[in-house]
Amino acid sequence: MASIAQVREVLRGLNPDVDRKVKGRYPVRFRGISFNIKDSDVDTYLQNRESIKRPEETAFFIPGHYEHVIEIQGRGPGAYRLLREDDDIKIQHGNGFLIQLSGISSNYAISLCDSESIDKDILRNIFMRSHRFRGRDDVDLVELLSRVITVKVISPESHAFHKNIKQLKAIAEAGIYHIAFGNGVGVTLSSSWDRSSYWLDTRRRESVQFPLRTYHSELVAYYQLALGSESLILSYLALYKILEYFFTSASEDVLHQKIKEKLVTPDFSHSKVTKLRELVKTVRSFDQRMDERKMLVTVLEKYLDKTELSQWINDYEKKHPGNYTTDRDIFGESQKVDKNDSQLFPSISKRIYHIRNALVHNKEGEISRFIPFSGQEKILFNETPLLLYIAEELILKTGKDIAF
């Protein structure tokens, strides 16, 4: 039987007040919250304590039991139907394997507290849930953490996978895919206790004047899609569409100017073969050099002011030092915005186009690609503000003045 000292030890991350045992439970108090912990749960935990492993921040393992925190994606009705109060989902195999989607296990819950310090996001889960049980004296630790849903893989002791963490995790991932398929709801393994969602970060609330221009409706539609999407991938690509819209027209303007310069020279004549060849060469060489990234540079050169863009970067980096102007790994490639006059637009276009390709392409073995729910969302979170600023400038500068 667990002693009071042992209960304090395994809950040391909470620095709890535990002084007695009542009917098979230990009343626990910390930071104004009261709950109980069963002596049987502490006994079971102590029996497994030496074999516990935490292979990832949000994963728990003892031989024959792999457990991983999951996230339910989206806000549709299916997400709310997937797991109702006290419900769980089970998938069983005839050889004794079990996949279960349910609340956190007591072993995992206690292990989170069995540390010198407890993660602030875990504490937030406890405090958020404690208000619901105010006035009750029979609440236990698992109930306080009931917002934490995990997928569990239980394997028979005789099986070769019993101690294979990598294989049990792979089965867990396959299981939540089947659950997602069967319920039409996105379910993913959580990579961090920080459950904050990443969305397009505007963080502003400003008064606006009556519009003095009308704007291109297609561009505004993509802008609204970017602001309203729960997916940063969709937000980034929607904003990129606004830039991409001008690729052809901006590039053609440059080519037309070059052609005009040839046509207006004093010695040009439609009857001079050499001059016509020079004209054809100008068109061909322009077409050969003009790929999408160079088109992007052309759009920036045509519509954006270097001084204003550079100043925006300065202002942004006052709150986010070095976000753009220091070397950072962006999807497998070192990127840095060079604010020198000749390199500002090329370095920004290279960065934006590289991110776009990482989102769009997914060739096996390619380093520069985006993998959902892998933690790479934070890169997009840091990168979308620059693209948002550029898209807003394009919408504004291509608008038409209203003749009041």
Image: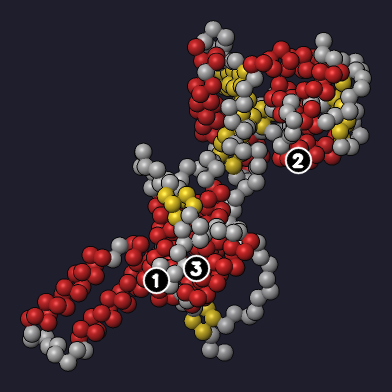
Residue to which mark 1 is pinned: 342
Image quadrant of residue 375?
A: top right
Of label 3 and label 1, which has the lower sequence position?
1
Front of the two marks 1 and 2: 1
Image quadrant of residue 13?
A: top right
Q: Is residue 122 above or below residue 316?
A: above
Q: Where does residue 313 sit, x and y in percent of width and height?
A: 54, 66
Image-based side of 228 in relation to 85, left or right? left
Q: Is residue 68 visible?
A: no
- Distance of mark 1 from mark 2, alpha carbons? 49 Å
Secondary element at image label 1: loop
Judge by depth and name the residue closer to the eye, 46 or 373: 46
Amino acid type of disc 2?
Arg
Residue to which mark 3 is pinned: 390
Badge 1 vs badge 2, beta-carbon distance below 8 Å: no
Q: Which mark is residue 181?
A: none
Of label 1 and label 2, which has the lower sequence position?
2
Give the residue drawn at x 59%, y 36%. Answer: 190
Residue to which mark 2 is pinned: 124
Q: Residues within 10 Å of mark 3 (few under 14, many from 20)?
A: many
Q: Quadrant of the C terminus?
A: bottom right
